[in-house]
Every structure is written in C-alpha cells, then in structure tokens.
Image (cartoon, grey):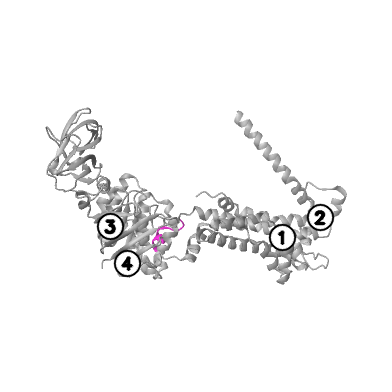
Amino acid sequence: MSFLDLKNVTKIYPNGTKAVHETSLSIDEGEFMVFVGPSGCGKSTLLRMVAGLEDITEGDINLDGKLMNEVDPSERDVAMVFQNYALYPHMNVYNNLAYGLKNRGIDKETIEQKVNDAAKLLQISDYLQRKPSMLSGGQRQRVAMGRAIVRNPKIFLFDEPLSNLDAKLRIQMRLEIKKLQQKVGVTSIFVTHDQVEAMTLADRLAVINNGIIEQLGTPIEIYDNPKSLFVAGFIGSPQMNFLDGNLKNKTLSAESFKIKDIISDFEGDVTLGIRPEHLSQKENGLINLKVDLVEQLGSDNLVYGQLKDKKDFCYRCPGNLIIEKGSNLSLNIENNKYYIFDKSTGKRVN
Amino acid sequence: MTRFITSSFSHLILLIGILIMVIPVWMIFASSTHTSSMINMNGLQMFLGDSFYENYLRVLLYKGGFFKEITALKMFFNSFIMATGVAILSVITSLMAAYALVYYRIKYATLLFWIIFITILVPLELRIFPTYSVMAELNLVNSYFGLIVPISASAIATLFFRQFYKTIPDELLESAKLDGANTWRFFVDFLIPLSKTMIVAMLIFMFVFGYNQYLWPLLVTTSEQYWTVVMGLKMMSGSIVHRFAFVMMSMVPPILIIIVLQKHFIKGVFQDK
C-alpha cells in the first residue's frame, strides 16, 4: 500500500451535486502530486477531503496505513496552505508558527527551536515579532508555509497558494516551493488551475475535469501523450490547435489535406490536435496559414492566423524568424506529432 | 471665502446645540455649590458658590429613604454592581449565542437569530409581570442576582457579534482546526481576541444600559438596601441643593466610562478591518 491511498472517493453535496466521482489514486511517500483542472472541477474538494474539511460521501482515504474517513482534521497530522493564507491576524508571526505546536502540548524550548529553524529555512527570522498585516504578499506566503513546515506533518496540502501573488513573485515562490519540498521531502498535494505551475512543480500530475481524473502521469507523459481532448487542450501553452476531420481506412482528411497510414482502426468523425510548437515552415506543406497577428516573446514568436476555412490557428516559431502580418505560411507537422480524438467521446484514437 | 462662511455657520449651529445641552447641567452644578437658602431666595445660579464640599459630603453620607437605611454611597455601590453585572453577563451570553449561531450547524440558525432579534421589540416594561413572578418564585426579589439577570440577554449585542463573526473568513477556522484547535480553543484563541474592541464597546453600552435602569430595580427591590442611583433620584428627600448635588454625582459614572473608553467604543461600533 502506498503512503496516501484514495479508494473510490466520492463527494455528493446535500443539494445533490456530485463534485467528485469515484476517484482512486495512490501517492507515494515524498511525492509531489499536483491536481490541475479548471475552476469548479472538484480538485479543491478532493484536497479538502484529504484534509478532513469536507466529509467523504463514499469511499476510503488511507494515510500512512490508517483509515482517515472519520478522523478529525486536527488528528490527521496534515498541514494546509490556503489561497488567502489564512494567517491568524491577531498573532505575530512567531505565534502563528507556534500555535499548532502549542496545541499539541510540545514544551516551550522545543517550540522555540522548531519555529526558529523553520523561520531560518524560509528567511522570515527578521519578521517573527510582526503581525501578518505588516507583511507583504510574499512574506505572508512564506509564513503560511512556515506554519505548515514547523509541524512536520505527514502531508502538505496546497490550495492554490500562489494565485494571490503578482506574476513575478509567483514564479519565484513556485521555485521556492519546489526547492523546499525537495529539501524537506514531505509528501505534497498542490491544487492549481494554472497548467504552467502544474507542469513545473509536479512529480506526477492529475488532470481533473468534472470531478473525474482524466489523466494521471508525469508532466512530460501528459504533455507528450494526452489521452483525451480535454487533457490535450488543457495542458500546453498556447493551447493545442484543434481541427475537425474524418478518419477512414487509416486516412485522415481534415481542412484541405490528408494524412495517410495512421495507426488506428477507428472510423468516423474525429478531432485532430496539433501543438503550435510541433509545426515548422516548409514549402508545399500540409497547412496554409494566413497570418493575422504576431506576438514576439523574444525567445519565441507566437503566430496567430486563420486557415482556409476561417479556423483560428496558432504556430510557435523561434524568435529570430521574422514573420510579416498578412503573409501566407506553409506549415508541416514535425515528426508526425499529431493527436487524433474521437469527436463524440473525446478519447484519443491514435 | 464661501467655505469659511459655511463652515463657521455649521460651527455656530453646533455651538448653540452644545450650549442648549450644557447650560442646564452647568446651572444645576453651579446651584449645587450654594446653600439652600440662597437658592430658595434667588433661584438657580450661574456662578459657583462655596458650599461644594459641605453639600456633596453630606449627600454622600446622609442616611436617606423611608427607614433611613441607605446612603448615596451605598446607592452608587449598588448601581455599580448592577451595571457591571449586566455588562459582563450580557456580553458573555451574546458572545456565546453569536458563536453558536454562526459556527454550529444549527438548523434554522437564521430563524433563531431573528427570533432573538425581535425581542428588541419586547422591552422589559412589557414583560414585567411574568418576569417579576419568575423572580419571586425563585426567591430572587431583593438580591443583586434578581436585579441583574432579567436584563442580561442582549439582542443588540448578539446582533453585533454575529455580524462580526460572519465577516471572519472560513479559512481561519479551517486553518485553526488543522492546527489542532477544538471548538472551545477556537472561541478562546481566535474569536475573543479578534472581537476585543467590539467587546469593549458592548461592555460600555451595556454598562450604561444597566446603570440607567429605573422601573425594574424599583419593582424587584423592596428593601432600601438595594436602591440604585437612578431610583435614588426619585426617592431622595432633602433640600434642593442636596438633590442637585446628587443629580450631578449620578452623571459621573457613565461619563467617566465614556471618556476613558470612547476610543474603543468608536472602533468597536464602526469597525473597519
């Protein structure tokens, strides 16, 4: 049995809404798991069930070999970092960190030792006497993490902790969280709707949609090999291009081009997915793109335009290529990196 | 220039208002420092006389009432006990009632709250007979307990605390839970310190409310030993200057409370976080 085991965990709210469908998931000790999905997909609910803040309607949660379903949150030995940090406004930073330890009846010297160690690790030693209202966003974030670390819990739970920070700080804190987790080695679950955060932080990633885990795997697995239309569209930035098509006798026809010898026995309407970065310019290529707009990011250019049937399309090319607005590009798919999904079910078929 | 005129005009109105309120009080104070023969002959005085100590000391220590059993000093003591008791008890009950209403999973909590709230429409004077009969059954007539308890459930204070608790984000409770705080610890370690300014404001409010009670103490006490200051205003016999002196002294406790704690009062009632 792994460290954290979810078995057919289901959440149905009193009003009948099914927020989480029968979900099973195993997380190993020390692993950094990220739940990613759009808002309202049930990822936070799942996290809160692990924390004990939401009742489990059906199924079992086992942590470190113990059934957690009926265990009170205070007894679960989990620590959580909230989106708005939920620091205790009337206590200074020191007491914010020490409060959980005090409640566990730990003696004063040990508490002081632990708080000071955590503060040093997070570089907040200078602010220990300040109230949370006197700290900046980044500092509050650190205090919130300190409060989790200091207790030395079995598992860290992060509920979109970076979404209140500005873009620059978010990237910085993202790095710090990852470094810290590697240093402390505590099993962690991180919930986010930001796919970049998810990709960069995760050891393993669970893409959740409508209360169902659509795909579970390492970030690269999921990026390279999305199993459904939803996952393909959600992971990757800019988003994957989707074209309507038809698959018959191993030949795909879409737009004004055909691809032969596709490894699939599926026949019928399909959606063809191509990542913007898997394209390259080539004379007499498959796809003709009329350029509307070029976003120059420095390292890359994002080229937006339309295909023949007015379908929006994006192409990502190196930043040193100069592409004029209004020009026509001829593009090819690199190394046959395309994805075909059943149009009706969204399942991958190639 | 026009700004100067409008602001002086509004100041003038305020000053007139202040004078209308202050002058009668000042006249009573000034008159209470004269001898009673002086007042009887010349009417109310605008300027201080020289019998201040004499009059006030006599009022404080004079044994009044029908049975000559009670002094003003004892009345102040009674009023203090009553007002403090009402203040502390009503703050404790409304803190806890609000806590239960907001944080416990009570069915119909909102309905219950509104039932509590409409008791504002039923003042003590309306329920005075049943209340008295309960106190009599319990043998609490002529006791401090009987003076304090029936007026110690405050719907207004419950309202204030409830509204305040509702602004506290749920994450704080959840975070405290994960830190091992049970319901009691959350109340003591979080809600009480967070509502400190509001507690002070409600203490002042309820102190003055308790101090100002007239009809209830009049009914529930038959022994002069339990007379309060406000009752004494009516019951005190004696010459006009002594009554004036007593009136002046009766104003002191609430004014003192307000002066000392007004900063907390304003912060608590008009709380911006």
Q: Give the distance between the C-alpha atoms of the residues marked 1 and 2, in whole angstroms.
A: 37 Å
The percent position of residue A47, horizontal first and vertical second, equals 35, 58
Q: Which residue is mark 3?
A: A33
Q: Secondary structure at mark 1?
A: helix
Q: Nearer the viewer, mark 4 or mark 3?
A: 4
Specify which label sits upstream in the sequence, 1 or 2: 1
Residue drawn at (70%, 65%), measured in percent from left and top?
A: B147
Q: Earlier in the sequence, mark 4 or mark 3?
A: 3
SS for tag 4?
Answer: strand
Q: Chain of mark 2?
A: B
The residue wearing badge 2 is: B241
Marks 4 and 3 share the same chain: yes
Q: Look at the picture and state if A252 lies above or below A193.
A: above
x and y percentages locating residue A245 in the rendered image: 21, 40
For mark 2, give the secondary structure: helix
Q: Label 1 sits on what residue type?
A: Arg
